Image (cartoon, rainbow, N blue to C red):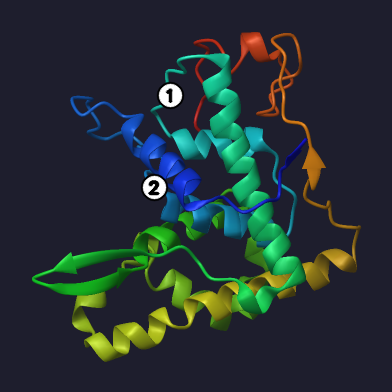
């Protein structure tokens, strides 16, 4: 039995990070195309928004956004199962953390060293979070005015807001960056309360044996058999 809410190890995070980037060949033509999610920080932001939002989102909704126009060429059924299981575990672990100990939640930010100085890179995480919001925009939009103070630090580093961070001092930028994690906690708490007043929220999977047979329904949520969906060459159309 595999615990599908167990946090990923550093090795597993690295594997998922490398897979997301390496699925696109170096010589691939990416001009004008959607490259999807290219790293673990962006994926972490995406999943945080999904588990924090107003509605439950099935894999058939978010998985095409992860791949963009570059769905992986799976080497085997086993590879698909392993990568998908890592994604599910990571999403569920975020959900459990925000539900049970939100004060311990921290986004996965990257670091970059320039001329011997290390900088925290939050843009990728914020882009992922904003992507998660746009996937259910019709449900988020009615609450945007109320959520504006909490959304501001995240939106500040998302490309969609035409962020001009280079105009800020290092101190000003760091002040906004430090507000991202608390904002994510506040947004989750807001929607948790809203959902509790409507219908019971779906609980993340805790313990389950992850095994998909060729003739089983595809775990991406398409409704098709696994062998005729993600295992084969059928194209997953990106959702815009």
Q: Is residue 11 left or right of residue 196?
A: left
Q: Nearer the viewer, residue 127 or 206?
A: 206
Pointers 1 and 2 in contact (C-beta within 8 Å): no
Q: Quadrant of the N terminus?
A: top right
Task: Write down the residue under mark 2.
Answer: 39
Task: Write down the residue under mark 1.
Answer: 72
Q: Relative to 33, is 99 above or below? A: below
Identify which residue is drawn at 43% across, 40% down: 15
Q: Which sits earlier in the primary sequence, circle 1 or circle 2?
A: 2
Q: Is residue 24 left or right of residue 145?
A: left
**In the displayed image of the protein, which residue is found farthest to the left?**
115
Residue 131 locus on image (x, y percent): 49, 52
Can residue 196 be seen here? The reply is: yes
Give the Cα separation between the discs numbered 1 and 2. Answer: 14 Å
Identify which residue is drawn at 51% across, 55% down: 44
Q: Relative to 231, is 120 above or below? A: below
Q: What SS does tag 1 mark?
A: loop
Residue 206 locus on image (x, y percent): 79, 48
Q: Quadrant of residue 160?
A: bottom left
């Amino acid at each position: 039995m595999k615990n599908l809410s167990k946090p990923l190890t550093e090795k597993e995070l690295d594997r998922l990070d490398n897979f997301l980037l390496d699925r696109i060949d170096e010589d691939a033509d990416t001009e004008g195309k959607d490259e999807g999610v290219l790293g673990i920080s962006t994926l972490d932001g995406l999943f945080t928004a999904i588990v924090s939002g107003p509605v439950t989102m099935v894999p058939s909704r978010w998985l095409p956004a992860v791949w963009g126009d570059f769905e992986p060429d799976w080497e085997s059924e086993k590879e698909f199962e392993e990568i998908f299981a890592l994604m599910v575990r990571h999403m569920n672990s975020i959900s459990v953390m925000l539900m049970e100990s939100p004060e311990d939640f921290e986004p996965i930010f990257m670091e970059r060293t320039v001329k011997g100085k290390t900088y925290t890179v939050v843009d990728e995480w914020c882009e992922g979070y904003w992507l998660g919001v746009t996937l259910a925009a019709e449900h988020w939009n009615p609450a945007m005015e109320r959520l504006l103070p909490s959304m501001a630090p995240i939106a500040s580093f998302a490309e969609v807001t035409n962020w001009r961070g280079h105009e800020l001092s290092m101190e000003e930028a760091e002040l906004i960056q430090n507000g991202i994690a608390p904002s994510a906690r506040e947004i989750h708490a807001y929607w948790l309360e809203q959902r509790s007043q409507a219908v019971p929220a779906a609980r993340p999977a805790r313990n389950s044996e992850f095994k998909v047979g060729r003739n089983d329904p595809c775990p991406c949520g398409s409704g098709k058999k696994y062998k005729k969906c993600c295992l084969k060459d059928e194209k997953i159309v990106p959702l815009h």
